[in-house]
Amino acid sequence: MQLRPLEEVLDSSTPVERLQELASYDNTPAECLCLLVKSCYKGVVEAVAQNPNTPPRILEELFCQYPVEVLNNSALQLLILETPNLLDKFVPVDHPNCDLIFEFDNLPDLFINWAISHQNKQIRFYVAKSSKTELKYLGLLARDQDESVRLTVALNPTTPSRLSNIILEQLAFSSDFAIRCCVARETKNLRILNKLALDKHIHVRCEVAENKFAPPNALKLLSIDTNKNVLRLVAENHNTPDYVLEILAQDKYEIILLAVAKNPNTPSHVLQQLAQHSWFDIRQSVAAHKNVDGSILKKLSQDESKNVRLAAVENLKRKRA
C-alpha cells in the first residue's frame, strides 16, 4: 500500500532523494513542508524554499540562508499582493550580515527594484555596496537623495570610472565634512584633490595630504598649512616633490623633520642638513636614506648613537656593493 506524503516524511527510512521530490511537488501539503524544512539535507531545504505551498512564515525563516530560492518562489508575487510588506519581514535590516543577502547571484529584478526604492537608506546602501549589483541599478542609485548612498555607488569597484568621478566631483561640494573626507581619501581625480586641498576642515585636508594620488600642486598648497598634522602627512607622502620637502625641512617640529628624513624624495643637501639634528631618530633615518652622500655617512658612522652608527655602516655597504 502506497504511503501518504506525511507518512513518508515521518518515516525515517525514506531516502533523501524521495524527500527532495516531496519537497519539490506543487501538491505537497504545507504540513509536510513544515517538517521537511527541518531536514539536514541542503537540497531538501532548498526545494522547500521554492515550493509555492510553503507558508510565508517558513519562507521568512529561510530567507537569510536561501534568499535566491525564496525570491524565485513562483507564489511570491501573489504573497506580496496579499501582504505588501512581506519583503520587509524577510529582510532583517538590523542583522549584522544583512548586506550579504545582496551578494548572492541571480537575485530577481522584483527584489532589487524593491530595495533601491526602499525608504530605509540602509537597504539602498546595501544594494549600492554590492559587487553583484548591475550597472542599470547603480546608475539609478547614483541619483539617490542620500549622499552616503551616492558615495557608496562611486566607491563600488564595479562602477565605471566616468560615473564614479561624476559622483565624487558632486560630493566634493557636500556640506557634510565626513562625506568630503571620504571623497578626499578615495578619489584619484587630480582636479578633486586640488579643490579639497583648500577645504576649510582640517580632517579633509589631512585626507588629501595622505592620498597617494595627491598631485604636487595640492601637496605644495598643503605644505604651508597651519596644522602640523597636515604638514607631517605632506612630508610622508611619496608624491611630495623635493622642493616642497626642502621647505618642510625648515620646520621646528621633530615629527615633521623625521618624516622628511624618511621620504624617498628628499634630496641629499636636505639630508645633509638633517644629519646634524640633535634627535637621533632623525639622524638614523638620514643614515638609512638612499639619497644620502657617502661623506655624510662616514660622519654618521662615528655618531654617538649606536643605532645611527649601525644604519650608516649598513648603508655604506649597500652603496659599495
Image: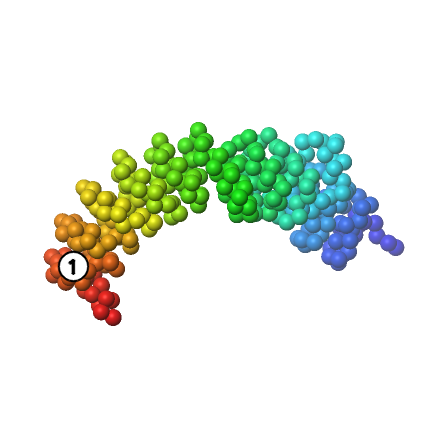
Residue found 37% across the figure and 45% down from its top: 215
Residue found 53% across the figure and 31% down from its top: 146
- Left or right: residue 187 versus residue 200 is right
- Say if residue 31 shows up in the picture: no
Residue 317 falls in image quadrant:
bottom left
Nearest the viewer among 158 and 15 is 158
In the rendered image, the vertical position of residue 173 relative to residue 134, given as above or below = above
- Can you say which quadrant of the picture contains the N terminus? bottom right
Q: How is the image coloured?
A: rainbow
Q: Amino acid at mark 1?
A: Ile
Q: Which residue is mark 1?
A: 296
**Looking at the picture, how far across and down is residue 234, in whole percent?**
30, 44
**Looking at the picture, how far across and down is residue 314, in whole percent?**
22, 65
Nearest the viewer among 74 and 201 is 201
Nearest the viewer among 241 and 210 is 241
Residue 63 falls in image quadrant:
top right
Residue 91 falls in image quadrant:
top right
**Looking at the picture, how far across and down is residue 26, in whole percent?**
80, 46
- Left or right: residue 125 versus residue 258 is right
- Can you say which quadrant of the picture contains the C terminus? bottom left
**Looking at the picture, how far across and down is residue 120, in whole percent?**
57, 31
Residue lying furthest bottom in this view?
A: 321
- Left or right: residue 316 versus residue 50 is left
Residue found 18% across the figure and 63% down from its top: 294
- Left or right: residue 113 versus residue 164 is right
- Say if residue 173 shows up in the picture: yes
Circle 1 sits in a helix, a strand or a loop, which is it?
A: helix
Residue found 26% across the figure and 35% down from its top: 226
